Amino acid sequence: MNRDDQQMVEFFEAVAKKAAEKKMVVNYHGAYKPCGLRRKYPNVLTREALIEFEYNGWTNEANPIHHNLLPYIRGFAGPMDYIPASMRNSTKDNYRPIGDYPMEQGTRAHAMALFVVLNSPMTMLPDAPSDYKREQECTDFIAKIPVQWDETKLLQGKIAKYTVMARRAGNDWFVGAITNWDQRTIELKTDFLKPGKYKLEAIQDGINANTRAEDYKQVEFEFSAGENLKLNLASGGGWVARIVPSK
């Protein structure tokens, strides 16, 4: 469906209409860019219309630079079915496009942070179920991330360079931070939170993430709203956190 001529646009609307009659939801994959169809048919939850994970099977285009373009360009047009959180992660130097066994460009924390940085109310995981069973700590964290949000804030960012996105679901906040191929330190201001004490659980780049992209560290601690947190991102790195009020 990678075209947007009149015949294809009519087909998209016909599918949305028939699916709505049957009380079914739709995800258009291999689609042209969003054009407002989901305003008429809310059952159209998301669509691809971007270079995403599967492109790692034959190109190097779905890289951390590209990930830092999507929120500012494609994301304005509507939800993005990117397929984040691969457990097969690579640095810039050891990445290879492999058609039947693709790897994600960037660190493990970067790949997981895409669940927050990029928005889609229907998504999927790109790897085999056995990969996620082996990586239970990461899988348990991913399972806590919602796909519907009550509030979204871009905390920091520079197109093609880095992005820090915060999204709220109920009383829980999730923050995703990603960088391009440049290693960087980010000072995260937490003044977007209501006053009080909070518990933070995060997946961050491990000490060896610059040379072994799968290396990550899970951390938990408490802090007060308004404190600044220092995020150390490896090349192609990331950071993702769940922040909840302390009891």
Image (cartoon, rainbow, N blue to C red):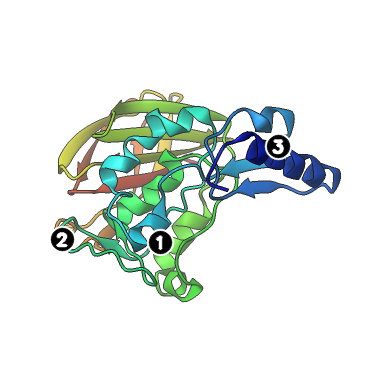
Residue lying at 46% horizontally and 73% vertically, measured from the top left: 133
Q: Earlier in the sequence, mark 2 or mark 3?
A: 3
On the image, the x and y values in percent for residue 38 come to 67, 33
Amino acid residing under circle 3: Glu
Residue lying farthest to the right in this orientation: 21
Tell me where residue 243 sits by quadrant. top left
Tell whether 246 sits left or right of 34. left
Residue picked out by circle 1: 138
On the image, the x and y values in percent for residue 202 come to 35, 49
Residue picked out by circle 2: 208
- In this orientation, does residue 219 appear? no
Residue picked out by circle 3: 10
Q: Residues within 10 Å of mark 2 (few under 14, many from 20)?
A: few
Q: Residues within 10 Å of mark 3 (few under 14, many from 20)?
A: few
Q: Residues within 10 Å of mark 1 (few under 14, many from 20)?
A: many
57 relative to 182, above or below: below
Please tell me whether mark 3 sits on a helix, a strand or a loop: helix
- Pick whichever, 218 or 134, lies toward us: 134
Residue lying at 56% horizontally and 33% vertically, measured from the top left: 34
239 relative to 85, above or below: above
Foreground tag (3 vs 1): 3
Cα–Cα gap, marks 1 and 2: 17 Å
Tell whether 114 sits left or right of 106. right
Tell whether 36 sits left or right of 186. right
Q: Earlier in the sequence, mark 1 or mark 2?
A: 1
225 relative to 175, above or below: above
The answer to whether the residue labelled 2 contacts the one labelled 3, judged by CB atoms less than 8 Å apart, is: no
Amino acid residing under circle 2: Asn
On the image, the x and y values in percent for residue 233 come to 21, 45
Foreground tag (2 vs 3): 3
On the image, the x and y values in percent for residue 210 come to 15, 56
